[in-house]
Amino acid sequence: MKASFKRLIAAGAAAVLLAGTAGAAMAEVSGGMSSWQLGLQNSVTTVMDDIHWFKNFTLVIITVITLFVLALLLYVMARFSRKANPTPSRTSHNTMIEVAWTVVPILILVVIAVPSFRLLYKQVELPAYDMTVKATGYQWYWGYEYTDEALAGISFDALMLKDDERQKVADERGVPLQDVPRLLATDYEVIIPVNKTVRVQVTAADVIHSFAMPAFGIKIDAIPGRLNETWFNARETGIYYGQCSELCGKDHAFMPIAIRVVTQEQFDAWAEAAKTDVDSANKQLMASIAAERKMAVAAR
């Protein structure tokens, strides 16, 4: 038994070491994700900043409680074992302890609830927004429409790229294959300007879906016949990925969300071209991004 336990510990340590070295060796994926990643995605919005803080805050509380309970168990095992305590106490009640184990958990829940409700309010209360994008869930892909008057007419459906399509799309966009991640990249991406507050209206055409973008800290159900709303303000340019997070049928795992955040100048040029031809607008945008990358590399 002891030998088996030692082998299990050794195997676990080896797995952790392998994960760490592999994560460092494998290339990082755009949008704050990386191979062998643990924990939440990197934050690019204030809402996700607060989610990160709240996660760490509750983790501290959970850790303290776990260590406290572990210490109590070890103390009880040592202090009240048959050998150390041959004549057990007949005490059946202790008023102070009973009050404490009722009041203390209530206080802990209150401490957790206050920032939790504040974060929930921040997520659902829409601030003044600069633009609106409508996302409609279908079986099994997403459709997008820019509903502002200045952007009226821009709409498209975004389908997941199949494995045999990724290399071709990567070549067309002038990016390495790792920038077209498997099961996440789509043929069309939602284009959003950086540092702008975007209202996202979410609905569905058939069954319940869920629009989720981890790096933005948003997740909201897409329900047929109902228009739900959420928002984000991305402070960094780049490509970010999410997925449908509601079990919606056989291809639920294959309806990703891809949002590309660009500069205001790039967005304006893309929007003007996309009013007549989204494909041509996308090619111009990717060419602009590629030129920007080359300039950044040359300046180093």
Image: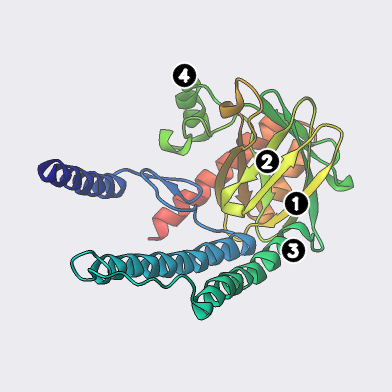
Give the crowd class for mark 1: few <14, some 14-19, many >=20 residues within 10 Å. some
Proximity of marks 1 and 2: CB atoms separated by less than 8 Å: yes
Residue type beneath disc 4: Asp
Q: Which residue is mark 3?
A: 121
Q: Residue at x 12, y 46 (%)?
A: 2
Label 2: few (<14), some (14–19) or many (≥20) C-alpha neighbours in 10 Å = many
Nearest to the eye among marks 3 and 4: give it: 3
Tell me the residue that label 4 is attached to.
Answer: 164
CA distance for labels 1 and 2: 10 Å
Residue 44 versus residue 117: which sits nearer the camera? 117
Residue 298, x across and y down, in percent:
40, 55
Would residue 281 appear left or right of 35 to someone viewing this image?
right
Kind of residue at disc 3: Tyr
Vertical comparison of 108 with 243: above or below: below
Which residue is at 82% across, 31% downward?
224
Q: Earlier in the sequence, mark 4 or mark 1?
A: 4
Q: Quadrant of residue 89?
A: bottom left
- The residue to which callout 1 is attached is 230
